[in-house]
Image (cartoon, helix red, strand yellow):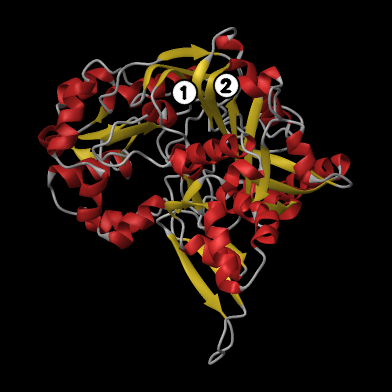
Amino acid sequence: MGSVSTTSLTTSLPVPAHADRLRGALLAADFTADGLLDLLGAPAYAALARSETVPALRATRGDSPLETLVRLFLLQEPVAYERAAAALPLTEALADGWAVRDGDAVRATVDVRPYGGPEGEDWFIVSDLGCAVGGASGIGTKDEGVVLGVGGASTTLAGITVRTPVGAALDLGTGSGIQALHAAQHATRVTATDLNPRALEFTRLTLALSGAHEAELLEGSLFEPVDGASYGLIVSNPPFVISPGSGLTYRDGGMSGDDLCRTLVQQAGDRLEDGGYAQFLANWQHVEGEEWQDRLRSWVPRGCDAWIVQREVQDVTQYTELWLRDSGEHRGDPEEYRRAYDRWLDAFEASGTKAIGFGWITLRRSGAVASGAVEPSVVIEEWPHPVEQPLGDTVRAHFERQDYLRARDDAALLADRFTLAPEVVQEQVGLPGAEDPEHVVLRQNRGMRRATRVDHVGAGFAGVCDGTLTAGRILDAIGQLMGEDPVMLRDRTPQAIRLLVEEGFLIPESLLPPAEGAPAV
């Protein structure tokens, strides 16, 4: 998460003057995601991701450069000066502020965490000590200006982001810079903003240590620093937690309820180029007497299509406990904890909030929608089931299919050819020994991992969709085979075909990727 306000911490930050030499030393020691897994083993590696350090401490009792770096940067343990000098260009690291000398030992000033890029890149995310997100008991800090490292939310956003080449990308509320780092791989120019100036410096460090090109770093709230600019991609993992004013600006937006997320979404439309995407993580209120889908539908800006996925819902007590533990309230005075709990529940009661939803919001700017030529496509759904990351291509394909379906009436649909998506399998459900299944389910084994129930006509139709015959000719053949009126089949089946296309089970011929060796159209 990024920040919307800040106070300065006392710790001075490193400078990236010799980041290339430090990066070379880290790589030479195999201080990478794969190197850590090999050194620690799967159980200790997984425990470290949960901020449990004991297994990693036990696995790094030797004196190799990799063990030294793990203890220094990940476990925040002092290491002997000689060991640090054998693993790092120590003179430069001390001069630039990555570490400090403490007698005969050396201590790290920041958390440097190996992070594997989507194409196998070896990157490093720099954050405040002890703030690489993980751990069941939360961060446990009340420092307003703290900068967090890699967590589940940030990797989720990175995974769902559409990765097509763009001229300009914006990472709003950059935090430690993970989204800016990803965007730097496919954007000519990256702008990263945050109200916390420390976060901007951490982003600078993350980019430099990862070997990425520099970003434009701007201090300010929401879209204020980039007023008037437009982008092909906007991403934000904002401080979305809905709280009664905790002051933890790295996670709480400082606005009432879900107003920060609403404002961010509503203002994004005017900052997108035609065809550009804006993608956010967000929390939203479930309010008595209001459908949550209607609440989110009102957020979608004019000129944009939207796909909003609710991944989780928590009642207000679960939500309160989660975030009180995140800030370490449960470890303090029990009476103060009860008072804080009461404040949260009082605020939720006053606003009529009965639960909080969490999920993904994707906008796509459309010139056709903005001009009124077509109606916007706004899909809002609840999907708490497992998915397969990365989902960027799945998100892009969703909007392409919406364009396709809007442009075709039933007659045009039946004149087109379709191919069954390669990851789809068929399941027959029924009693053991029964001659015929009770029903048939089509299931995706990748992406959103959707499943849909189809009748015998739908199953037969999907099974022969290989791009050879038009949908109309397939229905005619099914009608002859099953003794049904082909005209009636043509009348009643297009809606089912539309659903199979919309959910990605069938791919229209025009949306198929070009065959290997064939030129892209």
- Determine the residue located farthest toward the bottom in the rendered image: 433
Give whichever of discs 2 and 1 has the lower sequence position.
2
Badge 1 crowding class, 10 Å Cα cut-off, few under 14, some 14 to 19, many 20 or more, is many
**SS assignment at label 2:** loop
Q: Residue 346, position in %: x, y? A: 84, 44
Q: Residue 365, position in %: x, y? A: 59, 24
Instruction: Nearest to the eye among marks 2 and 1: give it.
Output: 1
Q: Which residue is mark 1?
A: 199
Front in this rendered view, residue 108 or 447:
447
| Three-letter code for the amino acid on which mark 2 is drawn | Thr
Front in this rendered view, residue 325 or 206:
206
**Label 2 close to label 1 by CB (< 8 Å):** yes
Q: Which mark is residue 238?
A: none
> Going by the image, does 263 lie left or right of 13?
right
Residue 88 higher or lower than 325, as above or below: above
Residue 61 higher or lower than 72, as above or below: below
| Three-letter code for the amino acid on which mark 1 is drawn | Ala
**SS assignment at label 1:** helix
The residue sitting at 25% across, 59% down in the picture is: 41
The residue sitting at 22% across, 31% down in the picture is: 103
In which image quadrant can residue 181 be found? top left
Residue 323 higher or lower than 372, as above or below: below
Q: Which residue is mark 2?
A: 6
Give the Cα separation between the discs numbered 2 and 1. 10 Å
